[in-house]
Image (spheres, rainbow, N blue to C red):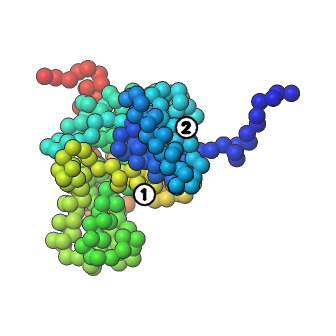
Amino acid sequence: MSSSPFFPPSCRKARVSIIGAGKVGSTLAQRVAEKKLADVVMLDVLEGMPQGIALDLMEARGVECHDRQIVGTNDYDDTANSDIVVITAGRPRKPGMNRDDLIEINAKIVKTAAKEAIARSPFAILIVVTNPLDVMTYVAWEATQLPCRRVIGMAGVLDAARFKTFISMELGVSIQDIKAMVLGDHGQLMVPLPRYTTVEGIPLQELMDAETIERIVERTRNGGTEIVELMKTGSAYFAPASSVSLMIEAILLDQSRIVPAAAYLQGEYGLRDLFIGVPCQLGCRGIARVLELELDEGERAAFHASAESVVQHLRQAHEILSGRTSG
């Protein structure tokens, strides 16, 4: 008889691997562990950094009172058999940069990280956080050849959270009463949808005039830029980490939550072969379905303009990865 221990499936702890132990990655590790969702592996190319962060988070367990394991590593082998892989690796924005400026820097990083991680965890669900989000999600999908519903871009949850925050600040109401929807790319052409946004079921248009709504929509589009310009040496990380944490919870607990996220479109909204923000039903197998909203003429035109921008930047990423860049 074998003397090796037997662990039934019910005894196996969920595992989340985070590729990139910068501020988003390390904050996400804290969120996941302290919510007791999964054991966490943080990987980074900088020797010692993920190990130090992991040890610090492990020592915090004595105060936070949880038993989740947090490991820091520079070796992809330590991420094996993950249920979810999150890619945060890449260069963050600095003042004067937009998300699109990061394509050349981050495309190669994301391609390598996705391939290496999924080679060790072929059944994982992959969540991409690196900017420009919609393009990097496509790059990761191409690199891994995973089923498209197991590759997801984070940004819609974050954009909707910012939209909700600015509405709450304007009206002076609890953010818990606000439901918001944002479509499109994670950039200047994102499409916040006031018509699908409510406060305790009351349509937003009944609580604000059109000028105020447009001001909040514009601030939502520039939510990340506003933080970059204030911080000067970095970009947002608390809200992005919370957004990914919500998605991880929906997947690991099979909550079938409806969230906006970058999903691969196969004819929905008249679009094909791109990842872009749309409402999705999120559960244990990744995206169970994409929900197709009824859009008016203006909303549909704005959404398609956002999609065209994603397609153009995806062509740029493909040129970079194939070595065909000009100039």
Q: Amino acid at mark 2?
A: Ser
Q: Amino acid at mark 1?
A: Val
Q: Is residue 304 visible?
A: no
Dot 1 falls on a residue whose secondary structure is strand
Q: Please state if 218 lies on the left or on the right of 151 as rendered.
A: left
The residue located at (18%, 71%) in the rendering is 212
To which residue does mark 1 refer?
259
Count neighbours of disc 1 (C-alpha within 10 A) and say few if under 14, some if 14 to 19, many if 20 or more. Answer: many
Residue farthest top in this picture: 323
From the viewer's perspective, is residue 49 above or below residue 256?
above
The residue located at (29%, 50%) in the rendering is 236
Query: Residue 82: which numbered mark, if any?
Result: 2
The quadrant in which the N terminus is found is: top right
Residue farthest right in this picture: 1
Q: CA distance from mark 1 to mark 2?
A: 23 Å
The answer to which of marks 1 and 2 sits earlier in the sequence is: 2
Which corner quadrant of the image does residue 140 belong to?
top left
Point out residue 80 in the picture as x, y percentages from the top left corner.
55, 31
Point out residue 145 in the picture as x, y percentages from the top left corner.
46, 31
Label 1 close to label 2 by CB (< 8 Å): no
Dot 2 falls on a residue whose secondary structure is loop
Q: Is residue 208 visible?
A: yes
